[in-house]
Image (cartoon, rainbow, N blue to C red):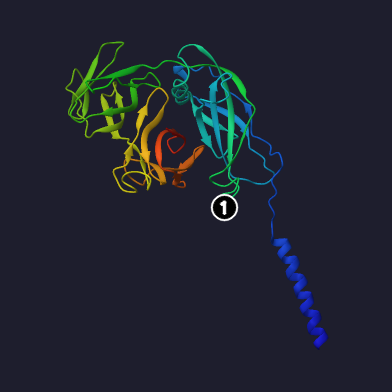
Amino acid sequence: MKNLFIYLTFIGLIGLLFSCEKDETKVVMLTNPIAPTIQTVPNLTLKRTSGNDTLVFVGTAVDPGFQASATYFLEACAKGNNFKDAVVILSSVVPTAFKITVSDLNGILLKKFPADQVSSVDLRIRSVLIVDAGTGALGTGTKPFEYSSEIKNANVTVYGLPRLDLIGSGIDQKIESALGDGKYAGFVKLDKTKAFTLKDPDSNVVYGTTGSKLAVNGTGITPTDNGWFKFGADTQGLTFTMDAYMIGLVGSATPNGWNSPDTKMDYHAQSGTWRITTDLTDGEIKFRLNDGWAWTLGGTPGSLTQGGDNIAVSAGNYTITLTIINGTTGTFKIDKN
């Protein structure tokens, strides 16, 4: 009986050993992971009459040798600029079909390229690959792997946009019509002590308000607060919207910590970015909208996501530039002065 017990115990240990080896899945990364590629680029001669059409950029995924999660960015820059001053067109977790309307793409590219003339543009797909988290090693959230496709060059023609100028707001600013259909939108900085009107520089028609409606030669529109707003106007339906859109820094490295009010950033229309130069202490920051937690961006400079990780910073004076992509993700640059 004793020998039988020893034999059965030995068999059980062998079974446990093989069971553990079978259950363990080892992830092995390729020495040279296969970068993503751009397979097809649509016709980029953009026309206002096709503003609602959808363009599709087709690519392939990064292959590190195992099933991996990655974020992909479709980027553009002037030919030969090596993406030093790239504009991010779209971000996605699936690179096989980047979809964007003609009007949205036109609005993005107008920030980098002149209207109504042909520009030579380089395009690429950049992948940000996070293998693990929390260890501080390469491939973690703070040190992600990045792989970029070969460059595709294309001729791009963007079209200029009809606009309405804000008269009386205190600074030169405008809202634009992406489709040329009488519907205008844009980010504007307003002062509640300064009522303003909207002037069409092509027709010289001036729009004001009568109560909650737009009206030709109406009274000035009075802002509800100071700061940045997403402003829309429909000159056909004679309606307008004015929604607060104030991007700020929040966190232990900012003057008010994790409490409101946040340290507000300013919008730069030409580049389509939010910027600030400010002093920070040792600690952490995030970006958020309108002093609330419904919309926040965190993560790494090359990959910001909704509710992403806090961003660690050391004490100093910084210039921070934030690019918001698709309204829900983004990238940022932080330069110590």
User: Which residue position is annotated with label 1?
Assistant: 135
Question: What is the quadrant of the N terminus in the image?
Answer: bottom right
Q: Is residue 21 above or below residue 164?
A: below
The x and y percentages for residue 254 are: 35, 43
Residue at 69 percent across and 46 percent down: it is 29
Q: How many marks?
A: 1
In the depicted view, which residue is nearer to us: 164 or 133?
A: 133
Residue 220 location, quadrant: top left
Residue at 44 percent across and 17 percent down: it is 48
Q: Is residue 218 above or below residue 190?
A: above
**Lateral position of residue 337 relative to residue 240, left or right:** right
Dot 1 falls on a residue whose secondary structure is loop
The x and y percentages for residue 150 are: 65, 27
In the depicted view, which residue is nearer to us: 95 or 102?
A: 95
**Lateral position of residue 291 relative to residue 337, left or right:** left
The x and y percentages for residue 165 are: 29, 18
> From this viewpoint, which residue is outermost toward the right?
3
Packing grade of label 1 (10 A; few <14, some 14-19, many >=20) is: few
Residue 123 location, quadrant: top right
Q: Amino acid at mark 1?
A: Thr
Residue 279 location, quadrant: top left
Residue at 26 percent across and 24 percent down: it is 238
Residue at 29 percent across and 25 percent down: it is 233
Question: What is the quadrant of the C terminus in the image?
Answer: top left
**Lateral position of residue 325 relative to residue 6, left or right:** left
In the depicted view, which residue is nearer to us: 324 or 248?
A: 248
